[in-house]
């Protein structure tokens, strides 16, 4: 099974690219979705997070206050490390289990922190979705309805585009039209299908 790790900076277009691969019949294993499931009410991870950061991190409904948690981890590096120590091992475990059970010709592990969290060993190839800093900043402010300075702080906390691209086997530069983006995905899809066949043949 060929496993492709898809990553990129925030607001680079990872979700859009994943959707395009999904329409081609490829299973997407989404680390963000796994993380959201892990912090649902009554889940052990949420209990650990509450014990670590206090009940102030919860809404009145008992659900995680994601906005407050995000503000906390982007303003406090120690809190960020504590949260990652709670979640990353569980996310890693789920990525392995779900990708091992995938039934599509190859699968994509969408992991925003694939490189930062040292999860590159889970995949055979790394696909980076890249975009220009100006475009990324504009999309982030618009998408999350945040100020320019807040967006700059979020971007500063991530790996740089150069660091991610240096680790990449494939790069999609998402500055162009949806039609051009779709064409890039289709070309990579064909490439990955061929690589998957090679891996399958080699395992026989």
Image (cartoon, helix red, strand yellow):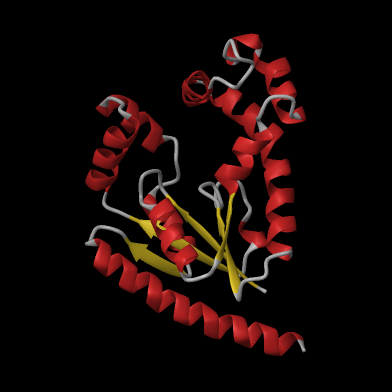
* In this rendering, position of residue 141 left or right of residue 103: left
Instruction: Count the marks.
Output: 0
Q: Up-down: is 78 above or below 91?
A: above
Name the residue located 53 percent from the left edge and 81 percent from the top edge. 193
In the picture shown, does residue 97 fall above or below 113?
below
Q: Quadrant of the C terminus?
A: bottom right
Residue 146: percent from left, percent from top = 31, 26
Question: Which residue is depicted at the point 52% across and 78% down?
Answer: 192
**Residue 84: percent from left, percent from top:** 64, 34
Quarter where residue 172 is shown = bottom left
Q: Toward the viewer: 169 or 93? A: 93
Q: Is residue 91 above or below residue 202?
A: above
Instruction: Determine which quarter of the picture holds residue 60.
Output: top right
Which x, y percent locates residue 94?
71, 50
Observer-nearest of 115 and 30 = 30
Q: Is residue 200 above or below residue 155?
A: below
User: What quarter of the picture does the N terminus occupy?
Assistant: bottom right
Residue shown at the point (50%, 59%) measured from the top left: 6
Image coordinates of residue 140 in percent, x first then y, are 32, 37
């Amino acid at each position: 099974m060929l496993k492709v790790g898809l990553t990129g900076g925030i607001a680079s277009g990872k979700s859009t690219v994943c959707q395009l691969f999904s329409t081609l019949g490829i299973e997407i294993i989404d680390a963000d979705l796994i993380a959201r499931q892990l912090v649902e009410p009554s889940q052990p991870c949420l209990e650990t997070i509450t014990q670590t950061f206090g009940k102030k991190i919860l809404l009145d409904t008992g659900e995680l206050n994601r906005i407050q948690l995000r503000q906390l981890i982007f303003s406090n590096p120690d809190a960020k490390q504590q949260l990652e120590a709670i979640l990353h091992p569980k996310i890693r475990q789920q990525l392995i289990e779900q990708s091992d059970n995938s039934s599509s010709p190859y699968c994509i592990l969408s992991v925003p922190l694939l490189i930062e969290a040292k999860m590159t060993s889970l995949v055979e190839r790394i696909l980076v979705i890249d975009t220009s800093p100006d475009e990324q900043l504009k999309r982030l402010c618009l998408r999350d309805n945040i100020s320019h300075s807040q967006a700059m702080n979020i971007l500063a906390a991530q790996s740089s585009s150069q660091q991610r691209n240096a680790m990449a086997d494939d790069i999609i530069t998402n500055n162009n039209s949806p039609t051009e983006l779709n064409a890039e995905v289709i070309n990579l899809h064909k490439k990955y299908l061929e690589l998957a066949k090679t891996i399958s043949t080699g395992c026989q």
